[in-house]
Image (cartoon, rainbow, N blue to C red):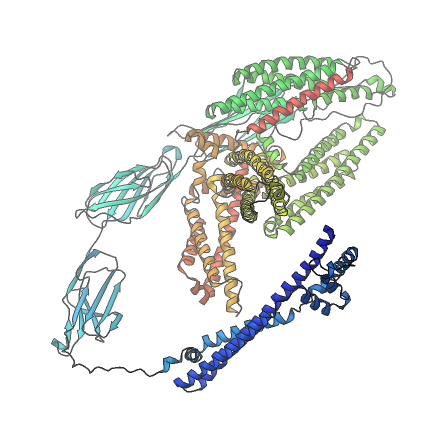
Amino acid sequence: MLNQSSHATIENLRASLAAVGRRRTLLVFLHQTGLLLIAMAALVLGMSLIGLWLPDAFALQLLLLLISGGVSVAVLWRYGRALRRLRADDRQLAGIIESRMPDLEQRLLTSLEFSPDSDASKRAGVSAQFVEQLWVDAEVHLRDQEQQLQQVSDRRAPLVSVSLAATATLVTVIAFISSDALMRAGAQLLWPFSLRPVVVDVAEPESPAEALALVITVEPGDIRMQRGRSASINVRIENGAPANVRLRMQSDQLNWFDVAMREEGSGSNGAAWSYYMPSVQDELVYYVSVDQADGPDGELRSQQYTITLYDLPRAEQIDLAYDFPDYTGMEDLVEADGGDMVAPEGTDVALQVTFNKAVQQAEIVFDDDSRVPLTVDGLTGSASLTVSRDTGYRIEATDFDRLRTEDADVFYIRAIPDQPPVLALHSPGRDQDVMPLEEVILQVEATDDYGLSEFQLHYSVVGTDEQAIDFLPTEQTRNITGNQMIFMEDLAVQPGDFVSYYMTLADNNALRGAQQVVSDIYFLQVVPTDQEFRRAAGGQQGGGGGGGGGGDDNSSALVTLQKDIIAATWRLRQQQLTMDQQQFDDDVAVLADSQRDAMKRARMSIERLSERLDFADDSFGNAVTHLQRAIEQMELAAGQLDAQALTTAMQPEQQALQMVLRAEAEINRTDVNFQRQQAGGGGGGGGQQEREDLRELFDMEMGQNENRYETPRQAGGGQQQNTEEASRLEELARRQESLTRAQRNLARRMEDLEEEQRRRELERLRREQEQLSTELAQLQQQMNRRQQMQQAQNSQQQGGQQANSQASNEDIQRALQQMQEAAQADSPAQAAARSQRALESLREQQRQMAQQPANSANQLAQNIAQRGQQLIQQQRELQQALQQLAQQQGLGQTRQAASNSEDVQELVQQQERNRQELAEIERMLRAVIARASNEEQQLLSQAQQANRAIRPLTDQMDTANRVLRNGMVNLAIDIEQEVADALNDLDRNLQALGAGGQAPAQSGQDPVMQAAADASALRQQLEQLQSEIDARQAGQSGDASIAEMREQLARSQQLAQQLAQQLDQGGQQPRQQGTPQQSQRGQQAQQLAQQGQQGQQGQQGQRGQQGQQGQQGQQQAGGGGQLAGGPDDPQQRNGLGGIPAPGEAALWGNARSISSEITRQSLEQFMNQPELLRGLLQPLIELESDLRARAELAQISRRLFSVSEEDIPDQYRQLVESYYRALSETGSQTQTAPAQ
């Protein structure tokens, strides 16, 4: 008996034969079918040509049909005979294969001869093992020659025949379509019976009837219509078709004139004519005349008709009389023949309206459908209104015939809001360290759009009464610069004390109440005069000479923390009335927790100090005492914060800061033993090492994250450090500043040091300067590589940033050169001067990096919106693939088999890719939340909302992934649909977030920036259209079709209209809305007060040299900052959306003319006259350049007067709390480690 494997072997042989048979059958079928089609095409085309050559005789055409039929039958018989010969059994196929593959040596035929169902295998004496080995040998040879087996049937002949058949068929069809005669010949060939003669009975003609008279019908006849409307006169002639139809008109009751009519259609028994009048301005009498021989005067006339006109009442002239509020200081104005109003809020405007006819009543209708009636006197009407908001209005009137105004002109009202005053602290511009005998100059500038009623400087030493300096002059002015010199000696301060100061100002709006602005609080920290020398307690010990080093003048981390708590308390107290209660409670709780964290840090410092029992003098004991007093005040302040008594908490907070500063002053005090220095010796460095150890207690690491209550100074720094390069640059700038300070200190005490000490200090500072130069050079190389990569990835975006990149490289290169010069300086004074210049170059580089848009939250938001669209598309593709997979799966397929299939595994990988894309969007959202500036609160809120929606979506994706991995495709389809719905909801949030980087109404972006972007897009569209037109003019085909060019022109027209509307209406929108956060709070007066307060904080937030550089940049621009939206900015009052300032008339005119010209012209006109499109490009380029310049100036102004909001995300607050908790735990572990 043959085993199962042998049976499988013979079945494999038969399967191989069957595959060869099927391939051979298919190829022969294609070959015979191709030959059949070629023969039939040749027969039909040949017979049709013969029929076309023969005369149109029925007998000949019938003969051709019979011949064609006979040939067709023969061809079909041959085709069927060839197909019947395809039937072959396995042995015949094996014979064919053996003939084509001699290497088989009859193995295949022999194997089939001894197959299980053959008689040979059942004969006696046939060995089963022999037969089995025979089959295996045949299968092995077939497998080895599988490629030759595939080529047994030649496929070249079938391919050639099919190609020729397709060609013959196509030629035949084209020939019949292109030749009507050949088509008729083919039709006659198929149906020759159409040529048989047809007998037609012809009726005798009837005698002609009597001709009917002409009938003239005129529509609409008499007309009563509104003057200026269009009219159409239609004439229908019946019972004839005259060649000359005239329309005669009369407008002066004396002279008639003819007008040509247009023939609409004619026939044997009538004709139709028409005349169109686009605008009828005069009353008319008219009739229609037709030439007729038997008529009077040789013509036939219709009756006369009249066109009677009437006028709707409308306003022909509007005169405006402005009565400006007293606080503006503006003289009243009368504007004749106006209509549009642009005036400060609270302005009373008297309207005198002149109508085209006597009216019975009239009224002013506003956009919100509110109405103000006019006092009517014949042809005139009068009314008055108060400008309080932006709106539009129209004049509607009703005359004595009860006719009412239609399509009245709409005029706009633009209310110029009274902006809050703006405060700028120019000097010192930040917290500053001062000496007890120093004279500090405070330079403060206040501006308002109309005038100030209060401008004061308040300063005090902790524990003393506050002093106020009034900078307000007697006469009303819009810009005040106040200078005040504070003599620290007169305040009797000592190292460890500090002077706090702030400014208050208010405008002069007596109409709705003055808007008051209170600045942030600043500190003047008193430090020792150079170094304080005193005799040490144990002066008779060992010789000196070591000492070494000096303390860093920077404030410790504990001092910085306490300052931030005071600043946050101050600001929170100012905003308490305008904040949500829940948000206020949360912020106060964070402040109280932060104050307790400071207490823990101070206690940790005391515990560390207590471990040191071998201090050289009593300065450390004094420091402990001051820290203990600071802890008492901190505890008192925390209790007041718990009770939400912010004003009361300010005093203990400041007392605590004073105690911490005094403790730090004790640590920084240097002991010098004059007898030791005179006697010489070493070992003086031990006490200094003790002080350095103690100072480390104050300089605990606070990390790179800014805390929740950071000041505007810190917020500005965080914006500049949103990349690794910015962080490294900030670190290098801080180290360079410390090095400069150390060089100055060394220059001051050169005479007190010995030669060897001077040499060591100079060498140490030189090495540190060289190290800074090396690290800065490495940073420059890294930045250059990044810029090159970005340019390679997106050359268009980088094209606008090349100027900034070049300027940044110049700043870094200049700083490198100055560092090298400082390292080679011969004296500390020269090195300090050159280091200071290098530091200024680094700060300028930081400012340049902060202005680059690549790191902005708006740019990142737009990228997120694009990635959201991509994720939606990927999700759709995934759902489609799942649907196709569900249709392709068999009904009996198990879950295990489905989960192991390659299609399911591929879809699982696609799910994981979508999941990774969602994780990337979540990461980018977190970056937006971290990078959003204080004036981008709505952007921040939208990012937080989108981020909250991602987590449940992530869970749904994970669930769908697990379900699909288990092979449950149908369930995965349902879950993926839920994922798609959630993604659509998320995408709406992301699109709103992305629009926040573009639309002024959502992101606070200057409308000029959006207009500049639209102008750039319009220019690109027109340039592409111009290139396509030029290519077609040169005889080339171009890349776009006519339909695509039409769509491109339509997009250009839409962009042009949008640009013109933005310039007309967009200018006032940002100022009305303020910040999105303030819009939600609802009270306009408080909004403006907050904007003024926070606007000056935005200026003050750029503390240190950045603030001074911003001031210098504004001065160097020659007032450019004001043009860009500063306090005296005419654009704020007269710019976009307001009264056109000088130079803006051309801006508006270009935009409107471009929009009008593009809208009026068609694609054909542009293609026929390419110079029309070229003529639009130059003014468009000038408009784009002008708008970009204005937008850049506006960005500079917003940075100088940016609004600093206090809406801090809950997530960030929790991170800060966790961070301080981790610091506290780390400190506790550090404390217990020595004991262990």
Instruction: Farthest residue to the front: give it.
Output: 124
Query: Is 768 on the left-hand or right-hand side of 189?
Result: right
Query: Is 135 on the left-hand or right-hand side of 24?
Result: right
The spot of residue 11 in percent (x, y) is 69, 56
Position of residue 496 relative to residue 1128, above or below, is above
The spot of residue 349 in percent (x, y) is 31, 39
Q: In the rendered image, is residue 528 in sight?
A: no
Displayed quadrant of residue 181: bottom left
Position of residue 1090 relative to residue 599, above or below, is below
The spot of residue 276 in percent (x, y) is 26, 64
Q: Which of 1183 and 127 is in front in this view?
A: 127
Query: Is 66 on the left-hand or right-hand side of 712?
Result: left
State the residue at coordinates (41%, 87%): 55
State the residue at coordinates (21%, 53%): 311
The spot of residue 294 in percent (x, y) is 13, 78
Query: Is 1035 on the left-hand or right-hand side of 1066?
Result: right
State the residue at coordinates (63%, 50%): 793
Position of residue 664 relative to residue 198, above or below, is above
Q: Which of 575 and 1160 is in front in this view?
A: 1160
